[in-house]
Image (cartoon, helix red, strand yellow):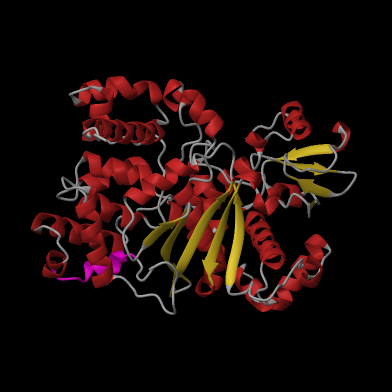
Amino acid sequence: MHLDPDTCYKAVASHDRRFDGRFFVGVSSTGVYCRPVCAVRTPKRENCTFYESAAAAEKHGFRPCLRCRPELAPGHGLADISGRLAQAAATLIDEGFMAEGSVATLAARIGVTERHLRRLFDAQFGVSVLEYAQTQRLLLAKRLLADTALPVTEVALAAGFGSVRRFNDVLKTRYGLTPLALRRRAADGVADRLVFDLGYRPPFAWEAWLRFLATRAVDGIEAIRDGTYMRTLLVDAGGSTHTGWVRIEHVPRRLVLRVTLSASLARVIPQALGKVRRLCDLGCRPDVVDRHLGELAEAMPGVRLPGSVDGFEIAVRAVVGQVISVVQARRILGALARHAGQALDGTPPDGLRYTFPSAAAIATLPEQGLRDAGVSAGKARTLLALAQRVANGTLALDAHAQPELTVAALREVDGIGDWTAQYVAMRALGWPDAFPGTDYALRKVLGVSTVRAMHERTAQWAPWRAYAAIHLWHRYEAMKDAASAAAEPETIT
Protein backbone atom coordinates (compact mmCIF):
# COMPACT_ATOMS: atom_id res chain seq x y z
CA MET A 1 0.00 0.00 0.00
CA HIS A 2 1.59 3.30 -1.12
CA LEU A 3 0.96 6.46 0.89
CA ASP A 4 1.75 9.77 -0.80
CA PRO A 5 3.00 12.08 2.00
CA ASP A 6 1.72 15.27 0.37
CA THR A 7 -1.77 13.86 -0.15
CA CYS A 8 -1.82 12.49 3.40
CA TYR A 9 -0.77 15.82 4.91
CA LYS A 10 -3.48 17.67 2.96
CA ALA A 11 -6.02 15.20 4.36
CA VAL A 12 -4.72 15.81 7.90
CA ALA A 13 -4.76 19.61 7.46
CA SER A 14 -8.36 19.54 6.19
CA HIS A 15 -9.56 16.81 8.60
CA ASP A 16 -10.92 14.98 5.55
CA ARG A 17 -13.17 12.19 6.80
CA ARG A 18 -12.84 10.23 3.57
CA PHE A 19 -9.36 9.23 4.77
CA ASP A 20 -10.37 8.27 8.31
CA GLY A 21 -8.98 4.78 8.94
CA ARG A 22 -7.15 4.75 5.62
CA PHE A 23 -3.91 5.81 7.26
CA PHE A 24 -2.55 7.15 10.55
CA VAL A 25 -0.15 10.04 11.17
CA GLY A 26 2.74 9.84 13.64
CA VAL A 27 3.77 13.19 15.15
CA SER A 28 7.42 13.27 16.25
CA SER A 29 7.00 16.36 18.43
CA THR A 30 4.44 14.61 20.67
CA GLY A 31 5.29 10.93 20.22
CA VAL A 32 1.67 10.02 19.48
CA TYR A 33 -0.15 8.86 16.34
CA CYS A 34 -3.54 10.15 15.28
CA ARG A 35 -6.38 9.71 12.83
CA PRO A 36 -6.50 12.21 9.93
CA VAL A 37 -9.61 13.73 11.53
CA CYS A 38 -8.01 14.47 14.91
CA ALA A 39 -9.29 17.80 16.28
CA VAL A 40 -5.95 18.92 17.73
CA ARG A 41 -3.96 21.70 16.06
CA THR A 42 -2.49 20.49 12.78
CA PRO A 43 1.15 19.47 13.33
CA LYS A 44 3.95 20.84 11.19
CA ARG A 45 4.64 18.90 7.99
CA GLU A 46 8.22 18.08 9.00
CA ASN A 47 6.96 16.40 12.20
CA CYS A 48 4.61 14.03 10.39
CA THR A 49 5.10 10.49 9.11
CA PHE A 50 2.31 8.35 7.70
CA TYR A 51 1.50 4.67 8.29
CA GLU A 52 -0.79 2.10 6.71
CA SER A 53 -2.07 0.83 10.05
CA ALA A 54 -2.13 1.58 13.76
CA ALA A 55 0.22 -1.35 14.25
CA ALA A 56 2.78 0.18 11.89
CA ALA A 57 2.66 3.48 13.80
CA GLU A 58 3.19 1.68 17.11
CA LYS A 59 6.02 -0.37 15.62
CA HIS A 60 7.82 2.92 14.99
CA GLY A 61 7.45 3.98 18.62
CA PHE A 62 4.29 6.11 18.58
CA ARG A 63 1.55 5.87 21.22
CA PRO A 64 -2.17 6.21 20.35
CA CYS A 65 -3.70 9.67 20.74
CA LEU A 66 -6.05 9.87 23.72
CA ARG A 67 -8.18 12.50 22.00
CA CYS A 68 -9.01 11.11 18.55
CA ARG A 69 -8.59 7.49 19.77
CA PRO A 70 -7.30 5.50 16.77
CA GLU A 71 -9.24 2.44 17.93
CA LEU A 72 -12.44 4.23 16.87
CA ALA A 73 -11.42 4.68 13.22
CA PRO A 74 -13.53 2.97 10.53
CA GLY A 75 -12.05 -0.18 9.01
CA HIS A 76 -11.42 -1.25 5.44
CA GLY A 77 -13.97 -2.73 3.05
CA LEU A 78 -13.31 -5.84 0.98
CA ALA A 79 -12.47 -3.88 -2.15
CA ASP A 80 -10.32 -1.28 -0.39
CA ILE A 81 -7.12 -3.30 -0.23
CA SER A 82 -5.63 -5.12 -3.16
CA GLY A 83 -4.70 -8.05 -0.95
CA ARG A 84 -8.13 -9.46 -0.09
CA LEU A 85 -6.49 -12.34 1.77
CA ALA A 86 -4.46 -9.98 3.96
CA GLN A 87 -7.64 -8.08 4.82
CA ALA A 88 -9.48 -11.32 5.63
CA ALA A 89 -6.68 -12.26 8.02
CA ALA A 90 -6.70 -8.78 9.59
CA THR A 91 -10.46 -8.96 10.13
CA LEU A 92 -10.14 -12.31 11.85
CA ILE A 93 -7.45 -10.87 14.13
CA ASP A 94 -9.66 -7.85 14.88
CA GLU A 95 -12.37 -10.28 15.97
CA GLY A 96 -10.17 -12.18 18.41
CA PHE A 97 -8.94 -15.11 16.32
CA MET A 98 -5.40 -14.93 17.71
CA ALA A 99 -6.62 -15.27 21.30
CA GLU A 100 -6.96 -19.00 20.63
CA GLY A 101 -5.07 -19.53 17.37
CA SER A 102 -1.58 -19.12 15.93
CA VAL A 103 -0.18 -17.63 12.73
CA ALA A 104 -0.22 -21.11 11.21
CA THR A 105 -3.91 -21.69 12.03
CA LEU A 106 -4.75 -18.22 10.77
CA ALA A 107 -3.02 -18.96 7.46
CA ALA A 108 -4.90 -22.25 7.18
CA ARG A 109 -8.18 -20.49 7.93
CA ILE A 110 -7.84 -18.21 4.89
CA GLY A 111 -6.30 -20.92 2.70
CA VAL A 112 -2.67 -19.83 2.27
CA THR A 113 0.70 -20.95 3.61
CA GLU A 114 2.12 -19.33 6.72
CA ARG A 115 5.02 -17.91 4.73
CA HIS A 116 2.69 -16.38 2.15
CA LEU A 117 0.53 -14.83 4.87
CA ARG A 118 3.59 -13.19 6.44
CA ARG A 119 4.54 -11.68 3.07
CA LEU A 120 1.01 -10.44 2.44
CA PHE A 121 0.79 -8.84 5.85
CA ASP A 122 4.09 -7.05 5.63
CA ALA A 123 3.23 -5.73 2.16
CA GLN A 124 -0.24 -4.49 3.10
CA PHE A 125 0.19 -3.28 6.68
CA GLY A 126 3.91 -2.76 7.16
CA VAL A 127 4.06 -5.04 10.20
CA SER A 128 4.15 -8.74 11.05
CA VAL A 129 1.02 -10.71 11.89
CA LEU A 130 1.98 -10.88 15.57
CA GLU A 131 2.72 -7.15 15.75
CA TYR A 132 -0.66 -6.37 14.23
CA ALA A 133 -2.41 -8.76 16.64
CA GLN A 134 -0.68 -7.25 19.67
CA THR A 135 -1.71 -3.74 18.66
CA GLN A 136 -5.33 -4.78 18.13
CA ARG A 137 -5.44 -6.43 21.56
CA LEU A 138 -4.07 -3.29 23.18
CA LEU A 139 -6.45 -0.97 21.31
CA LEU A 140 -9.44 -3.11 22.28
CA ALA A 141 -8.33 -3.16 25.92
CA LYS A 142 -7.85 0.61 25.83
CA ARG A 143 -11.36 1.00 24.48
CA LEU A 144 -12.90 -1.28 27.11
CA LEU A 145 -11.14 0.59 29.89
CA ALA A 146 -12.32 3.94 28.54
CA ASP A 147 -15.89 3.06 27.64
CA THR A 148 -17.04 0.40 30.11
CA ALA A 149 -16.85 -0.39 33.80
CA LEU A 150 -15.74 -3.98 33.21
CA PRO A 151 -13.24 -5.14 35.83
CA VAL A 152 -9.63 -5.12 34.64
CA THR A 153 -9.55 -8.92 34.76
CA GLU A 154 -12.50 -9.14 32.33
CA VAL A 155 -10.94 -6.47 30.10
CA ALA A 156 -7.72 -8.47 29.87
CA LEU A 157 -9.59 -11.68 28.98
CA ALA A 158 -11.95 -10.01 26.50
CA ALA A 159 -8.98 -8.42 24.72
CA GLY A 160 -7.19 -11.76 24.40
CA PHE A 161 -4.47 -11.46 27.06
CA GLY A 162 -3.77 -14.67 28.94
CA SER A 163 -3.39 -12.97 32.32
CA VAL A 164 -3.83 -9.62 34.06
CA ARG A 165 -0.13 -9.50 34.83
CA ARG A 166 0.83 -9.82 31.18
CA PHE A 167 -1.79 -7.25 30.24
CA ASN A 168 -0.41 -4.75 32.77
CA ASP A 169 3.17 -5.33 31.63
CA VAL A 170 2.41 -4.87 27.92
CA LEU A 171 0.25 -1.80 28.55
CA LYS A 172 2.97 -0.18 30.66
CA THR A 173 5.71 -1.02 28.15
CA ARG A 174 3.87 0.10 25.01
CA TYR A 175 1.79 3.04 26.26
CA GLY A 176 3.51 3.99 29.50
CA LEU A 177 0.14 3.82 31.27
CA THR A 178 -1.66 1.64 33.80
CA PRO A 179 -5.25 0.40 33.42
CA LEU A 180 -6.42 2.91 36.05
CA ALA A 181 -4.78 5.77 34.16
CA LEU A 182 -6.70 4.83 31.01
CA ARG A 183 -10.04 4.39 32.71
CA ARG A 184 -12.13 7.50 32.12
CA ARG A 185 -15.40 6.50 33.73
CA ALA A 186 -16.97 3.66 35.64
CA ALA A 187 -20.48 4.83 36.29
CA ASP A 188 -22.96 2.54 37.98
CA GLY A 189 -24.84 0.38 35.51
CA VAL A 190 -22.31 0.69 32.68
CA ALA A 191 -20.97 -2.83 33.20
CA ASP A 192 -24.26 -4.53 32.34
CA ARG A 193 -24.76 -2.40 29.23
CA LEU A 194 -21.69 -2.47 27.02
CA VAL A 195 -21.88 0.65 24.83
CA PHE A 196 -19.51 1.36 21.93
CA ASP A 197 -19.36 3.96 19.17
CA LEU A 198 -18.40 2.62 15.74
CA GLY A 199 -17.32 5.25 13.25
CA TYR A 200 -18.13 5.42 9.55
CA ARG A 201 -17.16 7.52 6.54
CA PRO A 202 -20.06 9.85 5.66
CA PRO A 203 -22.61 9.93 4.29
CA PHE A 204 -24.61 7.02 5.69
CA ALA A 205 -28.13 6.45 4.29
CA TRP A 206 -29.34 5.15 7.65
CA GLU A 207 -33.07 5.34 6.94
CA ALA A 208 -32.66 3.32 3.73
CA TRP A 209 -30.55 0.68 5.53
CA LEU A 210 -33.07 0.47 8.34
CA ARG A 211 -36.02 0.25 5.95
CA PHE A 212 -34.43 -2.65 4.07
CA LEU A 213 -34.01 -4.64 7.29
CA ALA A 214 -37.40 -3.63 8.70
CA THR A 215 -39.18 -5.07 5.66
CA ARG A 216 -37.50 -8.42 6.34
CA ALA A 217 -37.44 -8.39 10.16
CA VAL A 218 -38.34 -11.70 11.84
CA ASP A 219 -40.38 -11.51 15.05
CA GLY A 220 -38.50 -12.76 18.09
CA ILE A 221 -35.13 -12.21 16.40
CA GLU A 222 -35.28 -8.58 15.24
CA ALA A 223 -37.10 -5.41 16.23
CA ILE A 224 -37.12 -1.85 14.90
CA ARG A 225 -38.26 0.89 17.28
CA ASP A 226 -38.00 4.66 16.84
CA GLY A 227 -35.19 4.52 14.31
CA THR A 228 -33.23 1.89 16.26
CA TYR A 229 -32.40 -1.63 15.14
CA MET A 230 -32.21 -4.52 17.62
CA ARG A 231 -31.58 -8.21 17.18
CA THR A 232 -30.36 -11.34 18.91
CA LEU A 233 -26.82 -12.67 18.50
CA LEU A 234 -25.17 -16.06 18.79
CA VAL A 235 -21.37 -16.06 18.98
CA ASP A 236 -19.18 -19.17 18.97
CA ALA A 237 -15.73 -18.52 20.44
CA GLY A 238 -13.17 -20.48 22.41
CA GLY A 239 -15.24 -23.64 22.25
CA SER A 240 -18.24 -21.97 23.89
CA THR A 241 -21.49 -20.49 22.61
CA HIS A 242 -22.59 -17.06 23.84
CA THR A 243 -26.05 -15.65 23.25
CA GLY A 244 -27.36 -12.14 23.77
CA TRP A 245 -28.68 -9.10 21.97
CA VAL A 246 -27.47 -5.92 20.31
CA ARG A 247 -29.03 -2.48 19.83
CA ILE A 248 -27.82 -0.15 17.06
CA GLU A 249 -28.73 3.52 16.78
CA HIS A 250 -27.47 6.27 14.51
CA VAL A 251 -25.75 9.33 16.00
CA PRO A 252 -25.27 11.48 12.87
CA ARG A 253 -23.88 14.44 14.79
CA ARG A 254 -20.85 12.34 15.75
CA LEU A 255 -20.76 10.23 12.57
CA VAL A 256 -21.01 7.01 14.57
CA LEU A 257 -23.35 4.12 15.21
CA ARG A 258 -23.92 3.61 18.93
CA VAL A 259 -23.88 -0.10 19.68
CA THR A 260 -25.18 -1.57 22.93
CA LEU A 261 -24.40 -5.21 23.75
CA SER A 262 -26.02 -7.28 26.47
CA ALA A 263 -23.81 -8.21 29.43
CA SER A 264 -23.92 -11.86 28.32
CA LEU A 265 -21.63 -10.94 25.39
CA ALA A 266 -18.88 -9.41 27.55
CA ARG A 267 -16.45 -12.26 26.82
CA VAL A 268 -16.91 -11.99 23.04
CA ILE A 269 -16.93 -8.23 22.47
CA PRO A 270 -14.53 -8.21 19.47
CA GLN A 271 -16.52 -10.96 17.74
CA ALA A 272 -19.85 -9.23 18.41
CA LEU A 273 -18.60 -5.85 17.18
CA GLY A 274 -17.19 -7.55 14.09
CA LYS A 275 -20.66 -8.89 13.31
CA VAL A 276 -22.12 -5.39 13.69
CA ARG A 277 -19.48 -3.90 11.37
CA ARG A 278 -20.37 -6.43 8.66
CA LEU A 279 -24.10 -5.99 9.19
CA CYS A 280 -23.77 -2.20 8.77
CA ASP A 281 -21.04 -2.29 6.07
CA LEU A 282 -18.88 0.10 8.08
CA GLY A 283 -15.86 -0.46 5.85
CA CYS A 284 -17.66 1.18 2.93
CA ARG A 285 -16.16 4.20 1.14
CA PRO A 286 -19.28 5.97 -0.14
CA ASP A 287 -17.23 8.62 -1.93
CA VAL A 288 -15.80 5.92 -4.21
CA VAL A 289 -19.01 3.91 -4.62
CA ASP A 290 -21.33 6.86 -5.23
CA ARG A 291 -18.97 8.49 -7.70
CA HIS A 292 -18.85 5.27 -9.72
CA LEU A 293 -22.61 4.71 -9.67
CA GLY A 294 -23.23 8.28 -10.81
CA GLU A 295 -26.87 9.24 -11.37
CA LEU A 296 -28.12 6.05 -9.74
CA ALA A 297 -26.73 7.16 -6.35
CA GLU A 298 -27.62 10.84 -6.53
CA ALA A 299 -31.03 10.56 -4.87
CA MET A 300 -29.72 8.49 -1.97
CA PRO A 301 -25.99 8.95 -1.31
CA GLY A 302 -24.25 6.78 1.24
CA VAL A 303 -26.22 3.57 0.69
CA ARG A 304 -24.69 0.59 2.52
CA LEU A 305 -24.96 -3.11 1.82
CA PRO A 306 -27.24 -4.59 4.49
CA GLY A 307 -24.87 -7.36 5.56
CA SER A 308 -25.26 -10.13 8.09
CA VAL A 309 -24.30 -11.29 11.56
CA ASP A 310 -24.21 -14.87 10.27
CA GLY A 311 -23.78 -16.02 6.68
CA PHE A 312 -25.80 -19.20 7.17
CA GLU A 313 -28.77 -17.12 8.31
CA ILE A 314 -28.70 -15.16 5.05
CA ALA A 315 -28.56 -18.38 3.04
CA VAL A 316 -31.59 -19.76 4.90
CA ARG A 317 -33.49 -16.52 4.37
CA ALA A 318 -32.68 -16.62 0.65
CA VAL A 319 -33.82 -20.24 0.21
CA VAL A 320 -36.99 -19.82 2.27
CA GLY A 321 -37.86 -16.62 0.41
CA GLN A 322 -37.73 -18.16 -3.06
CA VAL A 323 -40.99 -17.57 -4.99
CA ILE A 324 -43.03 -16.52 -1.94
CA SER A 325 -43.88 -13.14 -0.43
CA VAL A 326 -41.72 -11.44 2.17
CA VAL A 327 -44.59 -11.75 4.68
CA GLN A 328 -44.79 -15.52 4.16
CA ALA A 329 -41.01 -15.86 4.45
CA ARG A 330 -40.95 -13.92 7.73
CA ARG A 331 -43.63 -16.15 9.18
CA ILE A 332 -41.75 -19.33 8.26
CA LEU A 333 -38.44 -17.99 9.55
CA GLY A 334 -40.09 -17.04 12.83
CA ALA A 335 -41.43 -20.58 13.20
CA LEU A 336 -37.95 -21.99 12.49
CA ALA A 337 -36.47 -19.77 15.20
CA ARG A 338 -39.03 -20.92 17.75
CA HIS A 339 -38.39 -24.54 16.84
CA ALA A 340 -34.60 -24.66 16.50
CA GLY A 341 -33.16 -21.37 17.82
CA GLN A 342 -31.76 -20.85 21.31
CA ALA A 343 -33.95 -18.99 23.79
CA LEU A 344 -32.30 -15.98 25.43
CA ASP A 345 -31.87 -15.89 29.19
CA GLY A 346 -33.27 -13.10 31.32
CA THR A 347 -35.65 -10.50 29.98
CA PRO A 348 -34.36 -9.26 26.60
CA PRO A 349 -35.86 -5.99 25.31
CA ASP A 350 -38.58 -5.44 22.71
CA GLY A 351 -39.75 -9.00 22.25
CA LEU A 352 -36.37 -10.48 21.35
CA ARG A 353 -36.60 -14.13 22.35
CA TYR A 354 -34.55 -16.48 20.15
CA THR A 355 -31.31 -16.61 18.22
CA PHE A 356 -31.48 -17.63 14.59
CA PRO A 357 -30.91 -21.42 14.33
CA SER A 358 -27.30 -22.38 13.70
CA ALA A 359 -26.23 -24.65 10.84
CA ALA A 360 -25.59 -27.44 13.34
CA ALA A 361 -29.13 -27.07 14.75
CA ILE A 362 -30.76 -27.18 11.30
CA ALA A 363 -28.56 -30.08 10.15
CA THR A 364 -29.83 -32.29 12.97
CA LEU A 365 -33.51 -31.59 12.33
CA PRO A 366 -35.63 -34.23 10.62
CA GLU A 367 -37.13 -33.07 7.35
CA GLN A 368 -40.56 -33.12 8.97
CA GLY A 369 -39.36 -30.58 11.52
CA LEU A 370 -38.74 -28.10 8.70
CA ARG A 371 -42.06 -29.00 7.08
CA ASP A 372 -43.85 -28.29 10.37
CA ALA A 373 -42.41 -24.76 10.28
CA GLY A 374 -44.00 -24.23 6.85
CA VAL A 375 -41.00 -25.04 4.62
CA SER A 376 -41.90 -26.89 1.41
CA ALA A 377 -40.49 -30.38 0.84
CA GLY A 378 -38.03 -29.23 -1.83
CA LYS A 379 -36.75 -26.30 0.21
CA ALA A 380 -36.45 -28.52 3.29
CA ARG A 381 -34.09 -30.83 1.42
CA THR A 382 -32.10 -27.84 0.18
CA LEU A 383 -31.80 -26.39 3.70
CA LEU A 384 -30.66 -29.71 5.15
CA ALA A 385 -28.00 -30.14 2.45
CA LEU A 386 -26.84 -26.56 2.95
CA ALA A 387 -26.75 -26.86 6.76
CA GLN A 388 -24.76 -30.09 6.62
CA ARG A 389 -22.12 -28.52 4.36
CA VAL A 390 -21.76 -25.48 6.61
CA ALA A 391 -21.78 -27.51 9.83
CA ASN A 392 -19.06 -29.91 8.66
CA GLY A 393 -16.89 -27.08 7.34
CA THR A 394 -16.98 -27.93 3.63
CA LEU A 395 -18.77 -24.64 2.86
CA ALA A 396 -17.92 -21.28 4.48
CA LEU A 397 -20.47 -18.47 4.32
CA ASP A 398 -18.67 -15.53 5.89
CA ALA A 399 -16.78 -12.43 4.80
CA HIS A 400 -13.49 -14.35 4.73
CA ALA A 401 -14.62 -16.83 2.06
CA GLN A 402 -13.56 -16.39 -1.56
CA PRO A 403 -16.67 -15.10 -3.39
CA GLU A 404 -16.19 -16.76 -6.77
CA LEU A 405 -15.52 -20.19 -5.27
CA THR A 406 -18.36 -19.85 -2.76
CA VAL A 407 -20.89 -18.89 -5.44
CA ALA A 408 -19.84 -21.95 -7.47
CA ALA A 409 -20.14 -24.19 -4.39
CA LEU A 410 -23.60 -22.84 -3.58
CA ARG A 411 -24.84 -23.57 -7.11
CA GLU A 412 -23.87 -27.23 -6.59
CA VAL A 413 -26.53 -27.54 -3.89
CA ASP A 414 -29.78 -28.82 -5.36
CA GLY A 415 -32.37 -26.05 -5.13
CA ILE A 416 -29.91 -23.14 -5.20
CA GLY A 417 -29.66 -21.17 -8.42
CA ASP A 418 -27.84 -18.03 -9.44
CA TRP A 419 -30.22 -15.62 -7.69
CA THR A 420 -29.77 -17.30 -4.31
CA ALA A 421 -26.00 -17.66 -4.71
CA GLN A 422 -25.57 -14.01 -5.72
CA TYR A 423 -27.82 -12.79 -2.89
CA VAL A 424 -25.76 -14.77 -0.36
CA ALA A 425 -22.53 -13.41 -1.87
CA MET A 426 -23.86 -9.87 -1.58
CA ARG A 427 -25.13 -9.98 2.01
CA ALA A 428 -23.20 -12.79 3.71
CA LEU A 429 -19.83 -12.38 2.00
CA GLY A 430 -20.09 -8.61 1.49
CA TRP A 431 -18.99 -9.04 -2.13
CA PRO A 432 -19.45 -5.57 -3.68
CA ASP A 433 -19.88 -6.86 -7.25
CA ALA A 434 -22.46 -9.57 -6.54
CA PHE A 435 -25.66 -9.04 -8.52
CA PRO A 436 -28.80 -11.23 -8.53
CA GLY A 437 -29.56 -10.51 -12.17
CA THR A 438 -32.60 -12.76 -12.46
CA ASP A 439 -34.46 -10.85 -9.74
CA TYR A 440 -37.94 -9.81 -10.87
CA ALA A 441 -37.87 -6.41 -9.16
CA LEU A 442 -34.49 -5.50 -10.64
CA ARG A 443 -35.58 -6.47 -14.13
CA LYS A 444 -38.82 -4.54 -13.69
CA VAL A 445 -37.22 -1.29 -12.55
CA LEU A 446 -34.57 -1.48 -15.30
CA GLY A 447 -37.09 -2.39 -17.98
CA VAL A 448 -35.23 -5.44 -19.29
CA SER A 449 -36.61 -8.88 -20.04
CA THR A 450 -33.58 -11.13 -20.53
CA VAL A 451 -30.52 -12.05 -18.47
CA ARG A 452 -28.25 -10.91 -21.30
CA ALA A 453 -29.90 -7.51 -21.42
CA MET A 454 -29.55 -7.27 -17.65
CA HIS A 455 -25.79 -7.95 -17.83
CA GLU A 456 -25.35 -5.37 -20.58
CA ARG A 457 -27.35 -2.79 -18.65
CA THR A 458 -25.50 -3.29 -15.34
CA ALA A 459 -21.93 -3.70 -16.63
CA GLN A 460 -21.38 0.04 -16.17
CA TRP A 461 -21.72 -0.35 -12.38
CA ALA A 462 -19.07 -3.04 -11.91
CA PRO A 463 -17.32 -3.59 -9.50
CA TRP A 464 -20.03 -2.04 -7.29
CA ARG A 465 -23.10 -3.79 -8.68
CA ALA A 466 -24.26 -5.00 -5.25
CA TYR A 467 -24.70 -1.37 -4.21
CA ALA A 468 -26.49 -0.74 -7.48
CA ALA A 469 -28.89 -3.58 -6.63
CA ILE A 470 -29.75 -1.97 -3.28
CA HIS A 471 -30.47 1.36 -5.01
CA LEU A 472 -32.65 -0.39 -7.59
CA TRP A 473 -34.61 -2.32 -4.94
CA HIS A 474 -35.33 0.96 -3.17
CA ARG A 475 -36.52 2.44 -6.48
CA TYR A 476 -38.78 -0.56 -7.01
CA GLU A 477 -40.35 -0.11 -3.56
CA ALA A 478 -40.90 3.57 -4.31
CA MET A 479 -42.58 2.62 -7.61
CA LYS A 480 -44.89 0.19 -5.80
CA ASP A 481 -45.76 2.78 -3.16
CA ALA A 482 -46.54 5.35 -5.86
CA ALA A 483 -48.71 2.88 -7.78
CA SER A 484 -50.56 1.92 -4.61
CA ALA A 485 -51.23 5.55 -3.73
CA ALA A 486 -52.51 6.26 -7.26
CA ALA A 487 -54.87 3.30 -7.06
CA GLU A 488 -56.55 4.50 -3.84
CA PRO A 489 -60.04 5.95 -4.46
CA GLU A 490 -60.56 9.60 -3.73
CA THR A 491 -62.40 10.43 -0.52
CA ILE A 492 -65.62 12.39 -1.08
CA THR A 493 -66.40 14.86 1.68
The residue segment tinted magenta is: 356-366
Name the side, left or right, on which 181 lies relative to 29: left
Query: Looking at the picture, how far across and down is residue 218, in whole percent?
Result: 31, 59
Q: Is residue 53 above or below residue 345?
A: above
Name the side, left or right, on which 236 lies relative to 77: left
Residue lying furthest front:
493
Q: Is residue 87 above or below residue 297?
A: below
Examine the structure image and report whether residue 191 is included in the region drawn in magenta: no
Name the side, left or right, on which 399 lies relative to 313: right
**Is residue 126 at least partly visible in the picture?**
yes
**Is residue 102 at least partly visible in the picture?**
no
Q: Nearer the viewer, residue 364 or 441?
A: 441
Query: Looking at the picture, how far across and down is residue 448, in whole percent?
Result: 22, 22
Q: Nearer the viewer, residue 214 or 233?
A: 214
Query: Looking at the picture, how far across and down is residue 151, in whole percent?
Result: 68, 77
| Residue 167 occupies quadrant | bottom right
What residue is at 34 percent from the left and 55 percent from the top?
217
Q: Nearer the viewer, residue 366 or 470?
A: 470
What residue is at 86 percent from the left and 49 percent from the top?
31
What residue is at 84 percent from the left and 63 percent from the top?
176
Name the side, left or right, on which 86 lies relative to 241: right
Q: How many labels were placed on the picture?
A: 0
Query: Looking at the picture, how far across and down is residue 156, in whole percent?
Result: 66, 72
Q: Is residue 410 above or below residue 100?
A: above
Q: Quadrant of the N terminus?
A: top right
